[in-house]
Protein backbone atom coordinates (compact mmCIF):
# COMPACT_ATOMS: atom_id res chain seq x y z
CA UNK A 1 0.00 0.00 0.00
CA UNK A 2 1.33 3.43 -0.96
CA UNK A 3 0.50 6.31 1.39
CA UNK A 4 1.25 9.93 0.60
CA UNK A 5 1.86 12.30 3.48
CA UNK A 6 2.83 15.90 3.58
CA UNK A 7 1.19 19.20 2.95
CA UNK A 8 -0.41 20.63 -0.15
CA UNK A 9 1.14 23.88 -1.29
CA UNK A 10 -1.34 26.46 -2.54
CA UNK A 11 -0.99 28.85 -5.46
CA UNK A 12 -2.00 32.51 -5.20
CA UNK A 13 -5.10 31.70 -7.27
CA UNK A 14 -6.13 28.93 -4.85
CA UNK A 15 -5.56 31.25 -1.89
CA UNK A 16 -7.73 33.95 -3.49
CA UNK A 17 -10.42 31.30 -4.04
CA UNK A 18 -10.32 30.52 -0.29
CA UNK A 19 -10.85 34.22 0.39
CA UNK A 20 -13.74 34.41 -2.06
CA UNK A 21 -15.37 31.36 -0.44
CA UNK A 22 -15.05 32.93 3.04
CA UNK A 23 -12.60 30.31 4.32
CA UNK A 24 -10.06 33.08 4.89
CA UNK A 25 -11.53 36.39 6.09
CA UNK A 26 -10.16 39.88 6.67
CA UNK A 27 -10.10 39.08 10.40
CA UNK A 28 -7.66 36.21 9.88
CA UNK A 29 -4.06 37.28 10.47
CA UNK A 30 -2.64 34.97 7.82
CA UNK A 31 -0.82 35.24 4.51
CA UNK A 32 0.40 32.85 1.84
CA UNK A 33 4.17 32.32 1.96
CA UNK A 34 5.78 29.85 -0.45
CA UNK A 35 2.49 27.96 -0.78
CA UNK A 36 1.74 27.72 2.94
CA UNK A 37 -0.92 29.69 4.79
CA UNK A 38 0.99 31.04 7.79
CA UNK A 39 -0.12 33.10 10.75
CA UNK A 40 1.26 36.63 10.74
CA UNK A 41 3.32 37.72 13.69
CA UNK A 42 1.93 40.35 16.00
CA UNK A 43 3.26 43.80 15.24
CA UNK A 44 5.16 44.95 18.31
CA UNK A 45 7.45 47.81 19.27
CA UNK A 46 10.51 46.14 17.74
CA UNK A 47 8.80 45.77 14.36
CA UNK A 48 7.43 49.33 14.42
CA UNK A 49 10.87 50.66 15.33
CA UNK A 50 12.51 48.86 12.42
CA UNK A 51 9.93 50.05 9.90
CA UNK A 52 10.32 53.61 11.22
CA UNK A 53 14.11 53.39 10.94
CA UNK A 54 13.82 52.07 7.38
CA UNK A 55 11.51 54.97 6.47
CA UNK A 56 14.00 57.44 7.95
CA UNK A 57 16.90 55.94 5.97
CA UNK A 58 14.86 55.78 2.77
CA UNK A 59 13.66 59.37 2.98
CA UNK A 60 17.15 60.57 3.92
CA UNK A 61 18.66 58.82 0.91
CA UNK A 62 16.09 59.69 -1.75
CA UNK A 63 14.46 62.86 -0.44
CA UNK A 64 11.79 64.20 -2.75
CA UNK A 65 12.83 61.90 -5.61
CA UNK A 66 10.79 59.05 -4.14
CA UNK A 67 7.69 58.34 -2.11
CA UNK A 68 7.25 56.19 0.97
CA UNK A 69 4.02 54.78 2.33
CA UNK A 70 4.13 52.78 5.52
CA UNK A 71 1.24 50.57 6.61
CA UNK A 72 -0.31 51.30 9.96
CA UNK A 73 0.01 48.41 12.42
CA UNK A 74 -3.79 48.36 12.69
CA UNK A 75 -4.30 48.44 8.92
CA UNK A 76 -7.48 46.70 7.81
CA UNK A 77 -6.62 45.92 4.20
CA UNK A 78 -8.69 43.00 3.00
CA UNK A 79 -6.84 39.75 2.19
CA UNK A 80 -7.80 40.16 -1.47
CA UNK A 81 -5.90 43.47 -1.54
CA UNK A 82 -2.66 41.80 -0.57
CA UNK A 83 0.14 41.80 -3.08
CA UNK A 84 1.16 38.81 -5.15
CA UNK A 85 4.80 38.23 -4.31
CA UNK A 86 5.10 35.13 -6.48
CA UNK A 87 2.95 32.30 -7.81
CA UNK A 88 2.94 30.75 -4.32
CA UNK A 89 3.20 33.82 -2.07
CA UNK A 90 0.68 36.53 -1.31
CA UNK A 91 1.27 38.84 1.62
CA UNK A 92 0.45 42.24 2.97
CA UNK A 93 3.53 44.47 2.77
CA UNK A 94 4.56 46.77 5.60
CA UNK A 95 5.57 49.57 3.26
CA UNK A 96 5.69 50.59 -0.36
CA UNK A 97 8.00 52.92 -2.20
CA UNK A 98 8.49 54.33 -5.66
CA UNK A 99 11.43 56.12 -7.18
CA UNK A 100 11.63 58.31 -10.22
CA UNK A 101 14.50 59.96 -12.03
CA UNK A 102 14.40 63.73 -12.17
CA UNK A 103 13.68 65.27 -15.58
CA UNK A 104 16.70 66.46 -17.45
Image: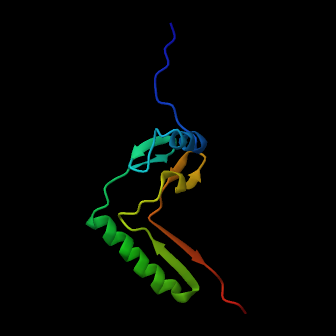
Question: Left or right of 12: which side holds 103?
Answer: right
Residue at far top of view: 1
Query: Up-down: is 80 above or below 20?
Result: below
Query: Relative to the observer, which residue lies in front, 25 or 90?
Result: 25
Q: Residue at x 48, y 47 (%)?
A: 33
Kindly indicate the quadrant of the structure image that contains residue 11: top right
Residue at far bottom of view: 104
Query: Relative to the observer, which residue lies in front, 43 or 104?
Result: 43
Question: Left or right of 45: which side holds 59?
Answer: right
Query: Relative to the observer, which residue lies in front, 27 or 58?
Result: 27
Image quadrant where one finds the C terminus: bottom right
Q: Residue at x 42, y 77 (%)?
A: 55
Residue at far right of view: 104
Residue at far left of view: 45
Colour scheme in use = rainbow
The mark total stands at 0
Q: Position of residue 37 (x, y in %)?
A: 45, 42
Q: Position of residue 62 (x, y in %)?
A: 53, 84
Question: Left or right of 83: which side holds 104?
Answer: right
Q: Residue at x 53, y 52 (%)?
A: 80
Amino acid sequence: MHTTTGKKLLTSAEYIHLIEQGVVTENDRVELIEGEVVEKMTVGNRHIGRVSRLAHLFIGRFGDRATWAGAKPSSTAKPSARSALSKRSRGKPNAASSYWKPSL
